[in-house]
Image (spheres, grey):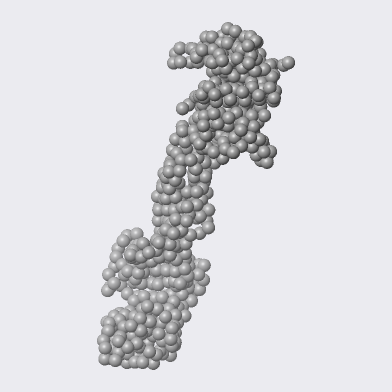
C-alpha cells in the first residue's frame, strides 16, 4: 500500500516525520541544557555559599535574576546602606562547626591607571589567607594571593590582555587611588576585576569602613550536608543579628541550589515543549488512521478477492497493521534524521537569545534514549492508529467486499 | 460418488430496508466430486447468491450447506477462509485480479496465504502460468494484459492451490466469443485432465452446454436439474 498510493503515503509519513523530528530536537535541547547545567554545577562548587546583607542586593548578587537563598515570606526588602555584615557576624560564623573557610569580601569600583591610561574596574578585597582555597578562579600566569601579601594584586584575564592598549604582565605596576600595586597573578577568565588583600582594599576604596563587609564567601566542610549547614548558618546569623524569619536582613546564596533550580526549570520547560511536539506526533497518528481508513475503503474489493483466495481475517488485519506500522517506522526513521539535523541547527537559532536560556540552549545532545523513545512512540502510534481500520477491513464479508466497486 | 457440496433446504433472505427479499427459497442440491455443473438462470433468479454460498463467501439464512461433509455453519470465519483457499478456486467475470500485483504475484498469492513453502510455491505458480500459456508474461501487471490473458491469469490463480472445486462465475462474460471459447476449452481440459469439480454460473445457455449437469434456477428455486445430453 505504501508502494501503491505514494503521494498519500508520503504525506502521512511527513506528518510522523514532523512529530518525531520535533520530539528529538526538543529532547536534545533539554538534554543539552541538563548537561550544561550539571557541568556548571560542578564549576560553581557545591560547597561554596555566599552570605550578603539585605535581600534585594543578594538577589542581584546572584547574577541569575533568580534570587539567592530563601526569599523571606514577608517580602521586606532592606536597603543596602543600612544593613551590613560586620565583625560580630564574622565571629559568629567562625563558631559554626560546619564551616571550613570564611572569606570576607569588600567590593567597589575604582579608577585604575596603567602606563598613564585610566580605566574603571571592580576592585575586590579578599582575605589573602583563604581566597586561593575558596575561589573558583584559576590562575593563568603568576600566582594567587598569599597570606603575607600586601600591595599586590591578581587581575582578571581580560583586564590583563585587552583593557589597556598594552597588556599588563606579571610584576608590572598598576595604580589604584594613588597606591601602586604589583601584579602577581593573572586569572584564566574573561573578567576585568582586580583582587587584592582586604587591608589594601580598605585603603583604596574610600567609602569602605574597616570591619564592615559586603559579603562572606564560605566553604563548608561537607558538601553532602549543604542544606543543614545553610540552616545552621541562618539560625546563628539570625540570632546575632536579632532578626527573625520575617524580617531577615541577609541572604545565603548557594550556587548549587540555584543551579538545581535552573535545571528544574529547564526540565519543566523541556517537558512543556516536548508535550507540544507530542501533539504534532498525535496529529501524525491521526494522519495514519485517516490514510488507513481511506485505504480500507479503496481496497475493499481487493480485500474481497484476497478473502476469496483464502486470506483469513488475521491475514487482512496483518496487512493493514503492517502498513501503518511501516508508515510510522519510515516516518520515525526519517524523523530521527531530521531531528538530528534540527538539533544541530538549534544552537544557531537560539544563539540570539540572551540570558540563561540562550546560554543553556547553546548545546544540544541527541541521546540514544530519545531516539529509541520517539521511534517506539511512533511505532506504537502507528499500530494503534492502524488497529481500527485494520480490524474493520478484516471483518468485511467477502461477498460484500467483492461486490464493492 | 460422495457429494462434495450439498445444499439442504437452503434459504437466503436479504433485508432490503423493512422488506425481506428471499433470493433462494429452499434449495436442495447435491454436487458430486468430478461433476461439471452449470447453474443457469436469468438475472434475479438467485444464481449469484447460490454461487456465493457454494463458494462459502456468504452464509445461508436457513438450511445447511456441507462442503466436503463439513457443515459450513460450524466453521469459524477463519476456518472457512482456509477451507475456501484450499478447496475452491474462483474464476470471476471481471477476473478480479489485484491491479498492482503482477501476474505472477497474483497467482502465487493463494499459496502465500496458505504459508506454503516458498520454493514449492514459486515452482507451482510458474507451472500453472505456463499451463495457461502465459509463461512469458508473468511479470506483467493486469493492466498490461488483454482481457483473455487476464482471465487466464485468474484461471492460473484458481489452479495454483490445486483446489478440488473450480467455481466460475460468468467466466466469459467480459470476453469476446473467440477468447471466451478459449477460456472454456481450457476449463473443460482442466476438468477432464485434472479431475476437478467445476461449477459454472452463467446466464448463457451456450456456455451451459459445456457442462455435464445443468441446474436451472428461477425465482430462487430449482426448476430444472438434469444431465446435459447435448454436451459438447
Pinpoint residue A203: horizontal percent, then vertical percent: 31, 87
- The quarter of the picture where residue B119 lies is top right
Residue A397 occupies quadrant: top right
The answer to whether B87 appears left or right of A215 in the picture is right
Q: Position of residue A199 (x, y in %)?
A: 36, 87
| Relative image position of residue A315 (x, y in whole percent) | 58, 35
Judged from this view, the residue extending furthest toward the right is: B1
* Front residue of A180 and B123: B123
Q: Position of residue A256 (x, y in %)?
A: 44, 67
A223 sits left or right of B66 in the view: left
In this orientation, which residue lies closer to the viewer: A71 or B213? Answer: B213
In-image side of A40 versus A110 (left or right): right
Q: Is residue A284 visible?
A: no
At a point 43% along the width and 42% down the height, the residue shown is A8
Q: Is residue A328 visible?
A: yes
Quarter of the picture containing the C terminus of chain B is top right
Q: Tell me the residue at 61%/12% (across/down).
A: B214
How many numbered callouts? 0
Instruction: From this view, report whether residue A67 is shown above or below residue A168.
Output: above
Q: In this rendering, is residue A6 above or below B185? A: below
Question: In front: B137, or A364?
Answer: B137
Q: Residue furthest top?
A: B223
Q: Front-most of B195 and B145?
A: B145
Placement of the N terminus of chain B among the 4 image quadrants: top right
Q: Is residue B33 above or below residue A124?
A: above
Rendered residue at 52%/24% (across/down): B175
Give me the residue at 65% from left, 24% from top.
Answer: B189
Amino acid at each position: 500500500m505504501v508502494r501503491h498510493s505514494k503521494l498519500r503515503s508520503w504525506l502521512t509519513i511527513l506528518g510522523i516525520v514532523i512529530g518525531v523530528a520535533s520530539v528529538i530536537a526538543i529532547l536534545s535541547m533539554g538534554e543539552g541544557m541538563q548537561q550544561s547545567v550539571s557541568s556548571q554545577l560542578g564549576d560553581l562548587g557545591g560547597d561554596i555559599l555566599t552570605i550578603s546583607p539585605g535581600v534585594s542586593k543578594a538577589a542581584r548578587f546572584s547574577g541569575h535574576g533568580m534570587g539567592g537563598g530563601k526569599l523571606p515570606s514577608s517580602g521586606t526588602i532592606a536597603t543596602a546602606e543600612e544593613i551590613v555584615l560586620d565583625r560580630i557576624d564574622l565571629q559568629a560564623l567562625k563558631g559554626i562547626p560546619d564551616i571550613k573557610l570564611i572569606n570576607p569580601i569588600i567590593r567597589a569600583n575604582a579608577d585604575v591607571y596603567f602606563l598613564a591610561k585610566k580605566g574603571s574596574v571592580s576592585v575586590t578585597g579578599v582575605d589573602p589567607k583563604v581566597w586561593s582555597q575558596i575561589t573558583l578562579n584559576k590562575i593563568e600566569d603568576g600566582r594567587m594571593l598569599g597570606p603575607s601579601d600586601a600591595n599586590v594584586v591578581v587581575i582578571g584575564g581580560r583586564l590583563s590582555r585587552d583593557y589597556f592598549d598594552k597588556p599588563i604582565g606579571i610584576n608590572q605596576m598598576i595604580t589604584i587611588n594613588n597606591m601602586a600595586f604589583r601584579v602577581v597573578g593573572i586569572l584564566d577568565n574573561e573578567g576585568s576585576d582586580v583582587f587584592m588583600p582586604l587591608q589594601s582594599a580598605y585603603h583604596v576604596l574610600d567609602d569602605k569602613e574597616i570591619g564592615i563587609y559586603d559579603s562572606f564567601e564560605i566553604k563548608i566542610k561537607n558538601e553532602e550536608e549543604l542544606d543543614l549547614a545553610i540552616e545552621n548558618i541562618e539560625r546563628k546569623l539570625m540570632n546575632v543579628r536579632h532578626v527573625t524569619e520575617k524580617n531577615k536582613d541577609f541572604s545565603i546564596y548557594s550556587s548549587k541550589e540555584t543551579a538545581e533550580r535552573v535545571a528544574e526549570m529547564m526540565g519543566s520547560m523541556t517537558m512543556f515543549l516536548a508535550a507540544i511536539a507530542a501533539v504534532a506526533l498525535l496529529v501524525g497518528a491521526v494522519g495514519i488512521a485517516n490514510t488507513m481508513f481511506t485505504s480500507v475503503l479503496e481496497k475493499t474489493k481487493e480485500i474481497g478477492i484476497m478473502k476469496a483466495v483464502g486470506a483469513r481475517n488475521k491475514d487482512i488485519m496483518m496487512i493493514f497493521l503492517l502498513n501503518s506500522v511501516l508508515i510510522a517506522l519510515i516516518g520515525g526513521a526519517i524523523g530521527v534524521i531530521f531531528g538530528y539535523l534540527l538539533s544541530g541547527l538549534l544552537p544557531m537559532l537560539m544563539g540570539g537569545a540572551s540570558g540563561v536560556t540562550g546560554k543553556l540552549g547553546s548545546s544540544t545532545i541527541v541521546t540514544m534514549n530519545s531516539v529509541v523513545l520517539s521511534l517506539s512512540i511512533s511505532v506504537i502510534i502507528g499500530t494503534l492508529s492502524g488497529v481500527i481500520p485494520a480490524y474493520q477491513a478484516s471483518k468485511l464479508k467477502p461477498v460484500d467486499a467483492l461486490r464493492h466497486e | 460418488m460422495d457429494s462434495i457440496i450439498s445444499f439442504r433446504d437452503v434459504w437466503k433472505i436479504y433485508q432490503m430496508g423493512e422488506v425481506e427479499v428471499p433470493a433462494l427459497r429452499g434449495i436442495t442440491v447435491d454436487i458430486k466430486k468430478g461433476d461439471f455443473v452449470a447453474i443457469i438462470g436469468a438475472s434475479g433468479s438467485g444464481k449469484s447468491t447460490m454461487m456465493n454460498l457454494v463458494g462459502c463467501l456468504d452464509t445461508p439464512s436457513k438450511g445447511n450447506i456441507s462442503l466436503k461433509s463439513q457443515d459450513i455453519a460450524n466453521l469459524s470465519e477463519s476456518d472457512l477462509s482456509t477451507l475456501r483457499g484450499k478447496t475452491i478456486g474462483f474464476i470471476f467475470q471481471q477476473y478480479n485480479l489485484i491491479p498492482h500485483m503482477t501476474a505472477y504475484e497474483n497467482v502465487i498469492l493463494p499459496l502465500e496465504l496458505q504459508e506454503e513453502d516458498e520454493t514449492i510455491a514459486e515452482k507451482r505458480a510458474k507451472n500453472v502460468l505456463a499451463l495457461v500459456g502465459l509463461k512469458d508474461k508473468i511479470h506483467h501487471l493486469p493492466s498490461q494484459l488483454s482481457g483473455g490473458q487476464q482471465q487466464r491469469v485468474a484461471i492460473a490463480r484458481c489452479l495454483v492451490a490445486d483446489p478440488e472445486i473450480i467455481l466460475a462465475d460468468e467466466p466469459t462474460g467480459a470476453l469476446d466469443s473467440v477468447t471466451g471459447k478459449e477460456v472454456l476449452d481450457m476449463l473443460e481440459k482442466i476438468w477432464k485432465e485434472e479431475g476437478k469439480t467445476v461449477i459454472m454460473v452463467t446466464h448463457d445457455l451456450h456456455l451451459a452446454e459445456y457442462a455435464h449437469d445443468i441446474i436451472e434456477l428461477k425465482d430462487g428455486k430449482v426448476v430444472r436439474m438434469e444431465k446435459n445430453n447435448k454436451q459438447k
